[in-house]
């Protein structure tokens, strides 16, 4: 009785449901295909978890969790593709013919996905070369300025000082100019422009602004990197100076706020020292005719 049931079950399992090309699709083939796909699905997931654990344990790259996730996910997709090809071969489907059709379709799709692939390759280059890391403060050719908060395969997230997240395609980091303010050294020298009235004692200006710079927390006071006042130009209405000062990482990461803090201290120091901060002035010369000027003391004829 048991042998008859087994024989009957095998007959049902071997019965052709339908034909796919020259292949008979049976229950046995469906079960076998399901087992193959399930194995590759499990293997891809296990491989992905193992790679992520290895990356975290050995700190292979200093990138965000999303970048590690992206790399391992690509490996997972590749295993899925291999498993699908093995499953098709198990069904007796000619994989080579599918490859020819897929190649023809891939040419057309490739043109449409050109930018995506460019960003993917650029992301891999960034990860391998390590020219960019989390926490770097960058200035891109497109005008984006901010802190790198995420590095992925397709894009990099840059957060500005206004807490705005800008999604930048990775190809922009490879093809364009990138100024990395914190690539190799956290210290940075900045120039703060200001002006004083003509006739002001230059030494007095130098001492006043140097003292003002020291009041800003984060100013570097190491030998050879002390704050300096440079006379850079004889302006139309003022002697134009620059406070040249080295700052630490925190100040370098907020250039606009840093400049505002130094200007605040410079203004206070110059006022305390009795140094005039000029404003633009123009002299008016009347060559001929009469000009009436209304003053508090009454009209004046010139």
Image: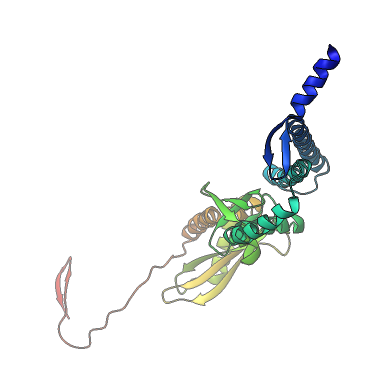
Expressed as whole percent of the image width and height from the top left, the position of residue 173 reads: 64, 61
Observer able to see residue 25: yes
Expressed as whole percent of the image width and height from the top left, the position of residue 229 reads: 59, 67
Who is closer to the viewer here, 302 or 129?
Answer: 129
Q: Residue at x 79, y 43 (%)?
A: 55
Q: Residue at x 26, y 83 (%)?
A: 285
Expressed as whole percent of the image width and height from the top left, the position of residue 281 reads: 35, 73
- Left-right relation of 91 to 145: right
Q: Residue at x 67, y 51 (%)?
A: 153
Who is closer to the viewer here, 16 or 93?
Answer: 16
- Left-right relation of 270 to 22: left
If the image is split into quadrants, where does the N terminus sit? top right
Residue 150, above or below 171: above
Observer able to see residue 185: no
Choose top left, top right, bottom left or bottom right for residue 113: bottom right
If the image is split into quadrants, where does the C terminus sit? bottom left
Expressed as whole percent of the image width and height from the top left, the position of residue 34 reads: 74, 32
Count numbered badges in the picture: 0
Choose top left, top right, bottom left or bottom right for residue 144: bottom right
- Left-right relation of 230 to 223: left
Who is closer to the viewer here, 33 or 294?
Answer: 33
Residue 183, above or below 85: below
Colour style of the rendered protein structure:
rainbow
State the residue lying farthest toward the right.
3
Q: Residue at x 46, y 59 (%)?
A: 271
State the residue lying farthest toward the top.
1
């Amino acid at each position: 009785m048991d042998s008859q049931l087994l024989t009957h079950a095998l007959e049902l399992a071997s019965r052709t449901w339908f034909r796919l090309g020259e292949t008979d699709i049976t229950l046995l083939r469906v079960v076998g295909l399901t087992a193959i796909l399930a194995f590759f699905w499990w293997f891809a997931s296990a491989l992905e978890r193992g790679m992520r654990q290895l990356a975290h344990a050995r700190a292979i790259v200093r990138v965000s969790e999303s970048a590690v996730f992206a790399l391992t996910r690509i490996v997972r997709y590749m295993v899925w593709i291999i498993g699908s090809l093995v499953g098709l071969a198990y069904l007796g489907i000619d994989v080579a013919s599918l490859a020819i059709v897929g190649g023809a379709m891939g040419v057309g799709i490739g043109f449409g996905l050109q930018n995506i692939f460019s960003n993917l390759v650029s992301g891999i280059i960034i990860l391998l070369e390590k020219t960019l890391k989390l926490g770097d403060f960058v200035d891109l050719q497109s005008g984006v300025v901010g802190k790198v908060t995420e590095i992925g395969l397709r894009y990099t997230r840059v957060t500005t000082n206004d807490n705005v997240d800008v999604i930048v395609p990775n190809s922009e980091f490879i093809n364009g100019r990138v100024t990395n303010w914190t690539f190799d050294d956290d210290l940075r020298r900045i120039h703060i422009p200001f002006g004083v009235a003509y006739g002001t004692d230059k030494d007095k200006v130098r001492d006043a602004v140097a003292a003002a710079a020291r009041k800003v927390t984060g100013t570097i006071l190491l030998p050879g990197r002390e704050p300096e006042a440079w006379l850079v130009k004889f302006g139309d209405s003022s002697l134009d100076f620059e406070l040249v000062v080295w700052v630490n990482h925190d100040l370098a990461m907020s250039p606009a706020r840093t400049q505002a803090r130094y200007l605040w201290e410079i203004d206070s120091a110059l006022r305390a020292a009795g140094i005039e901060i000029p404003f633009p002035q123009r002299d008016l010369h009347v060559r001929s005719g009469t000009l009436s000027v209304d003053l508090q003391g009454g009209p004046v004829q010139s």
